Every structure is written in C-alpha cells, then in structure tokens.
Amino acid sequence: MSENKEKIGLIIPACSDLNRGDQALVLETMRVMKKALQIKKVYMMSNNEVNQCEKFGLTPFKSILKHPSRATKHTSNLKYNKMLKLKWGIVASFDFIVSMMLLNNITRNIIKVFLNKETKESLRLYEKADAIFVKGRRFYA
C-alpha cells in the first residue's frame, strides 16, 4: 500500500436534512476522523441534494440500498394497503438478493456490471475507505 494515498472516510447513515443536531454530530465525527486518523477527504451518505455538505467540507455520496418505495413513487403512499406492502416486499426481496451478491467478493464483480454509475461510485468508496463512522442517533427499543 502506498504511503502517498489520500485517506478517505465515510459517514453513514444518510442524514439529508442536516438539522443542527445532525450538523453537530457530523462535524464532530469529521473532526475526529481528521485529527485521530489523518483522514483527508470525508464523504457523507445523503440521498437528497445537500448544499451544506460542500460548505462543511463534506462530499455527498448516495446509499447503495434504496427504500423499496422507489418502485411505486407514481402512486400515493398515504395508505399502506396490502398491495403496496406486497410491491415493497417484492422490491425488498430483489434488493436482498443483490445485497447478498455485493457482500461476496466473487459475485460482487458479476453484479457490478448491472449497477448504475452512482451505485458503482458508492461501492467504490466503501471498498477504498480507510474509516467508516456511523453517525449517532437516538435508538428506540
């Protein structure tokens, strides 16, 4: 491994609204990454456009696993009827298979061919990351 390699870090999960609490958590996480691990470039997962990211020195990247509602965006999701849940279940089942293939080194190279450019870039970031930090949040049991 080359010593001149620029170290990169990822902050997950997606937090796209960056309210003040999230901003504080993300900025503190970035500070710790840079100071303790000498991370030079920090990426933050965000599925929406976040203009604040660049202002804070973060580069946004998209999540690999998307919400199953993406297949039914044209319908109203105000009522969660059985048909909508069935559609989401089918999409989630397909996503599960793809995710399992991405976790295996052999099948990952096969499935990469079918991924879009955005997902390939996110996968590349995970593979090259020197550190991945999970942004804190309240946990409800």
Image: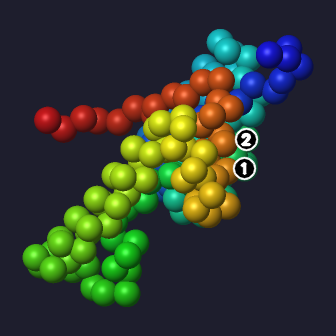
Q: Which quarter of the rendering shows the C terminus?
A: top left
Give the residue pinned by disc 1: 54
| In front of the other: 130 or 91 | 91
Residue 19 percent across, percent down from the top left: 47, 50
Q: Amino acid at mark 1?
A: Glu
Instruction: Identify whether 1 is placed above or below 113.
Output: above
Q: Is residue 140 left or right of residue 105?
A: left
Q: Is residue 114 left or right of residue 2?
A: left
| In front of the other: 61 or 110 | 110
Residue 61 visible to an observer of this rendering: no
Q: Is residue 35 left or right of residue 133?
A: right
Residue 32 percent across, percent down from the top left: 61, 20
Q: What kind of element bears circle 1?
A: helix
> Contact (CB < 8 A) between labels 2 and 1?
yes
Instruction: Identify whether 92 is placed above or below 27.
Output: below
User: In the image, which disc is placed on residue 10?
Assistant: none
Residue at x 58% of width, y 62% of height: 114
Q: Amino acid at mark 2?
A: Gly
Around disc 2, counting alpha carbons within 10 Å, would you say few (fewer than 14), some (14 to 19), or many (20 or more)?
some
Q: Tally the marks.
A: 2
| In front of the other: 65 or 14 | 65
Coloring basis for residues? rainbow
| Residue 8 location, quadrant | top right
Residue 15 percent across, percent down from the top left: 47, 49
Give the residue pinned by disc 2: 57
Residue at x 26% of width, y 67% of height: 90
Q: What kind of element bears circle 2?
A: loop
Residue 82 percent across, percent down from the top left: 10, 76
Residue at x 34% of width, y 52% of height: 96
Distance between the Cα atoms at labels 2 and 1?
Answer: 5 Å
Q: Which quarter of the rendering shows the N terminus?
A: top right
